Amino acid sequence: MMTAQIEQRRDLLYGLLVAIVAFFVYADSLGNGFAMDDFSVILNNPVLRGSPLDLIFSIDTTSDIQPVPYYRPLTYLSFWIEGRLHGFNPFLVRLLNVLLHSANAFFVYRLARGLLQDGRAALFAGLLFAVHPLNSEGVNFNAGGRNTMLACFFVLTAYLSHRRGAVGKKFSWAVGGAVLFTAGLFSKEHAVAVLPFIIWLEYGILNEQPSGPRLGSAGRLLPYALGAGFYFITRWITLDTHGVQTGIIPGLGAKVLESLYLVPNIGERLLSNLYIIPKYFLTVLWPTRLSSVYEVPGDMHLLALPLAAAWLCIIGILIRLLTRGRTAATLFGLSWLIAFWLPVSGLVWFASSPLADRYLYLPAIGIWIIFADQFFRLLPAGKTARRNAEVASLIILLFLSALTIVRNLDWRNDIALFSRVVKEYPENPYGHAYLGDSYFVRGRAEDLVLAEQEFKKALDLQPIVYTNDRPIPPMYSLMVNNKMGHILISRGDYEGALRYYSEALTIYPLDKEALLNRGKTFEYLGRYDEAVSDYRLFLSAPGREFDESRSYAEERVRELSR
């Protein structure tokens, strides 16, 4: 009895150690400001200024003309509460992120401790999660990482709660797990991937006690079915209201998405994984070139040899893990990795980047469990080997911690973040486009010069994608052309501005920003009939963007029509 108490106390202390390490590794991020989508999703989002009840039937977007199949009201509720408590103080927003990551690190250790017989291996797995720079985007990207961290928190606590309920045959713990699971779904849809693991827990209990009551297992799983059903029906109603999804199954019937986005077919999406999976593999093993924006090359012929070598390594590792390295913990880790990677694999299309570090925040928990399991299994017996292993583990963790601390500073602001992108990936047009936008937003005279330079680089590097023999520009092109028009107008180059605004309207004919500003440009050039036409199109275009300019456009139509 005393031994069990000592073991429990030691496990608690190890878990707290992991959480404390996670906090201090990310402590230097607390002074950072906002970056990327934080401004549109958090600071300037009209939904967050309304009632919390409005969040239930809101989708995760800030634009009427860019609906997306994201339904995450609990994530938005966390921002809504912060807005009411402290007005989005960046220090406090980031403090919550760091605390949430620390809590997740604690529960990753608890998960690993239940799978790994060696306590040191569980500690190593928890610390890998706590300090690996792959997770820095999830922690630092407020708008894009909060949903993943919340889902991770609820997934881990739901699984651990149900494990306790299944082992102890306690219905109350299963109900608690179901509540946590449902909260995870309302944070991010990827939380559904934990359900097979919860079902497997019950299956394992039935196998151990074949004569036991099957009704108990069914009863413990029923709350999960009810929670999932409630979530999917609410999600379906909300997305259907916004015209994003007309079927209950995500990704089906999304005609609005197909009309607004270049949606690759499933074959193209899966083919991209020939590059994406090795890129993730390299990022896990050697995370020194992290980026907030990655580009998946359209033509991979030049990468054929390195990709082939990478795939040989991946296949060799998988064969090793499934044969000589096969253990229950490793199989669990592989299953976890695959289950939580599938939602971002391209099987179901989502309107976002096909490759991002934060996508591995949840799936990579399986990798840390596998690595820790295999690392300590392969150690030879003896005190010397154990000591050498501890030293090697410490060196690895210190190296990863140092990389994470440095990476945190990249998230100070947009200019620092995208300067890192173009430094590491100078041929990435997205990095140049968003760095140019960062300079443009800062708005000083010298910044506009830098913005123009970056915008031109982005347009020069712009990949050409065709569908139905028609070139489709990347998503950033609309923004780049609009802002190039603004820069040239500020210099009095109206003909140049007209070219860029017209190009923006070629990309999206109902873009309100381009219509309004091209109308102004036509006025400057004395082409009043064309100005009136653009103003009228602006007034009739869908969406609430630039509502504050409606009275201006109406007045110009009246004045110029006389």
Image: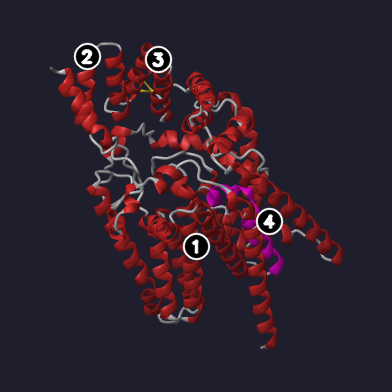
Q: Which residues are magenta?
A: 118-140
In front of the other: 175 or 222: 175
Q: Which residue is mark 3?
A: 492
Res 528 label = 2
Where does the image place residue 538, in percent across and percent down from the top left?
A: 23, 28
Residue count near mark 1 (Cα–Cα under 10 Å), binned few <14, some 14–19, many ≥20: many
* Horizontal relation, residue 285 to residue 175: left or right: right
State which tag comes first along the sequence, 3 or 2: 3
Where does the image place residue 470, in percent across and percent down from the top left?
A: 35, 20
Q: Residue at x 25, y 37 (%)?
A: 543
* Amino acid type, label 1: Phe
Q: Residue at x 34, y 46 (%)?
A: 69
State which tag comes first along the sequence, 3 or 1: 1
Residue 36 drawn in magenta: no
Label 1 and label 4: CA atoms lie apart by: 33 Å
Label 2 and label 1: CA atoms lie apart by: 58 Å
The picture quadrant where one finds residue 211 is bottom left
Q: Is residue 541 visible?
A: no
Res 153 label = 1
Asked if the residue under mark 2 is in contact with the one under mark 3, i.e. CB atoms within 8 Å, the reply is no
Q: Which residue is mark 4?
A: 324
Callout 2 secondary element: helix
Label 2 and label 4: CA atoms lie apart by: 77 Å
